[in-house]
Structure formats: structure tokens, C-alpha cells
Amino acid sequence: MTPRLLSLMLAIVLSAGCAAGRYAQGPHEEVPYPPKEKPKAEEIRHVPTGLEVSIEGAMEMLSGARLICVGETHDNIHAHRVELTVIRELHNRFPGRVAVGMEMFREPQQEALDRWTGGELSELEFLKESKWYDNWGSDFGYYREILRFARENRIDVVALNPSRELQEAVSRSGLDNVSEELRAKLPEMGPPDLWQRAAMRGIFGGHLPTEGMFDSFFRVQVLWEETMASRIVDYLKSPRGEGKKMVILAGGWHVRHGFGIPKKVIRRMPMPYAILLPQEIEVPEEKRDQMMEVELPRSPLLPADFFWYVPYEDLEGKRMRLGVRIDSHEGRVVVQRVEEGSPAEKAGIPEGCEIVSFDGNPVTDTTDLFYWIAEKREGDVAIVVYRLDGVERQAEVTFFRMPKRKAHR
């Protein structure tokens, strides 16, 4: 198997791994007081006691921690609503003493984050400077309100993930075979956690064809978490982070059971921490074909301090789509394919054309187009100027809801 193919397969599995809390299906993890009835939406349970607590009660208990880890399902808007609630409530209790660490940003994006929270960038400028769609790729709408709240309240946001270059090098070659230049950027790596390895094998082992591929996957998972832990501690020890609490937003399996980010932080800098997991009360019918049948190993570790039960709802099908596949190169955005029955097809936008502007706004890369389309609602109209064979033409596009696309995980 070529290194390129191995890297691609690992990337696919890793992207699924962050949402595995929803897609992994098997026996419920052992908790001392399992619920006697199906939990209701917005119910919050204190896992060690099994007691239901109010938002105020949960926040009172979370206030004793310096590190508050929220393990999300990336494509559930209700999980992000919980994250924003936690950040807002802690900010209200400790104004000026709360920071946010986000898995969704890589270390090289920190300058763009600082300029965003400092009020120097518009939203579109931030998306471009942070290379949001290249690095994370998910709909920015999932995180918009969180990042706007951080900017409005001058809350520091710390990019936690390693650079793509470092991640891909470790995936291909392992920790011992990266270049000297990249080796200098490696975080301190602790001994592997046997419970974490067993859990990851239970979830993903059957989906990776060889032992070597699982080892590569696990190396990258640990590299992510060691880097995130290192970034967290560096910030909290810095003058900007001194005396602050930090809310961590990361995929559920980076914080669940504590053997991921929390343990790796505590190894570097002992501090009180808490784990809160938004838990989906059910999986929609259209998502069930993505669920993985797994057998999680028995573990003495509690999955979290709090379960916050939420519905599941994504943005797929809610956002408007133009219905084109595009490529961006040297300031040109070219339509490669037009979907049948799409707003683009109905408006007469042809394959092979270059998109010049959208409602009078210049389009020079894919971020421009994603951003302006995201502003549209069902029934809205946009004027798209395109160029074909050197001639500029205009199309009037009316947006409507297209069928949900099948998710790839």
C-alpha cells in the first residue's frame, strides 16, 4: 500500500473518529447509575451519582475545574449550542478569566484567530486567513455563534491541532522517522494508554485492514492529543493564560474517559478538570446506515462527569446549495460539474465556466462562494456573473432546498 493511500485512508477514519460517540453502536458504557428511563432532551446527568442537575447546578460544579472539556459530535448543532452555553455561563461567572481551546484549528492558524478575536478581521477575511475550508472543512455555521461570542467578549481562542505537515509525516513514517526539522516540532510524547488503545481498537480496529494501519491511526490520534495538551498547557502557563480557565472543544473520543486530552494535560500540569459530553438521545433514520457495530471493552473509567442529553440535528438540507462542483486555482473559480435539477442548472450556469461574482461580490476562491451562498435562504435570488469562452454572462439563481447528500465518513 502506498504512503499516499495509507494517509488518505487514515484521514477518512480519523475524521470519523471524532464523531464516534454517535456512530459507534454497541453495549452502553458502564456507568454506576444507568438511567431507568430514556433520557429527555436537555436533561443533564451527573454521571458519578446518576442525579439530574440543573444548568445552574452543573455550572456550579464545573466552576471548580480549571480545564472544562466538552466532547462534541461535530455535525450536531445542539452539541454546539451546549458548548456555547458552557462558555457563556463560565464567562458570566468569571469575566475575563475564560479562554477557549479548539481542535478545529491548527497551530499555524493562531495568528488569524488572534486577529479575529481582536476585532481586526471581518468574518470572510477570517475564513480566508484561517483557511477554514482547507483545514477543517465543516460548515462554518456550526461554529459561527461560538466564535462571534468569543470576538464580542475578547475571549482568547487557542488553536490546538498540529500542522498538517507534521500530522501527515507522522502518519506516513512514524514518530522516529520524521525529518529533523519536524522532529523539533513534536510535542513531548508520553507512554501509550492501554485503555485508550483498547477503546480505539474496539471502535476502529475492524475498519482498518492491517495491524500496521491501526498503529498508524493510533499514532496520529495520540499526536493530535499530545499536541493539543501541549498547546493548552503552554497557554495556561503564559502571561495571557495565567489564572484563566479553559473550555476545550474537541471530538468526543478526544476527551471521553479522560485518557485523551485530559490525561495528557495533567501529565504536564496537574489541575482540576471536568468532562461534559452532549449525548444524542437518538440517531435519525437517515444516519443509521453510518453507525458502526462495535464491542467496546469493559473499562473502570467513567466516560464523563456530566451527560447533557440533546436531540440530533445537522445543517445538511437546511443550508442552500448552488449545486456545482468547483475548482479554485490562481484566483479563478471554475465550475467542473453542475448537478442535475440544481439551482445552478435551472439558472443556466454551464460546466467549464468561471464564476466572476456573486451578487456583486468578487469571487476569487472557493471561500468567497461558500460564504455568500451561506447567506441565502430558501426562495432568495442571487445574480451570478460567469465567464465562458471569454464572454461574461449573467444568471439569476433562485435557491431552493435540494435533497440531502449522503454523508461520507
Image (cartoon, rainbow, N blue to C red):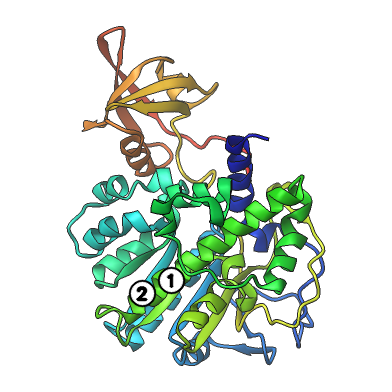
**Amino acid bearing label 1:** Ser
Question: Quick one: 119 or 76, which is closer to the camera?
Answer: 119
Q: Is residue 183 visible?
A: yes
Where is 337 relative to 229, above or below? above
Residue nearest the viewer, comparing 225 with 256? 225
Amino acid type at circle 2 is: Asp
For the point 46% across and 35% down, which residue is it? 321
Q: Quadrant of residue 146?
A: bottom left
Q: Position of residue 375 (x, y in %)?
A: 34, 44
Label 1 close to label 2 by CB (< 8 Å)? yes
Relative vertical location of residue 5 with respect to residue 93 in this rendering, above or below: above
Residue in the image at 56% along x and 72% along y: 190
Can you say whether 234 is above or below 16 in the image? Answer: below
Question: What residue is pinned by disc 2?
Answer: 234
| Residue at left offset 37%, top offset 58% | 107
Instruction: Judge the density around disc 2: few (<14), some (14-19), many (≥20) Cα neighbours within 10 Å.
Output: some
Q: Quadrant of residue 396?
A: top left
Q: Write the residue at 50% across / 47% down.
A: 169
The location of residue 13, given as percent across then percent down, is: 64, 49
* Residue carrying label 1: 230
In the image: residue 111, left or right of residue 259:
left
Q: Is residue 285 visible?
A: no
The crowd level at tag 1 (other Cα within 10 Å; few <14, some 14-19, many 20+) is many
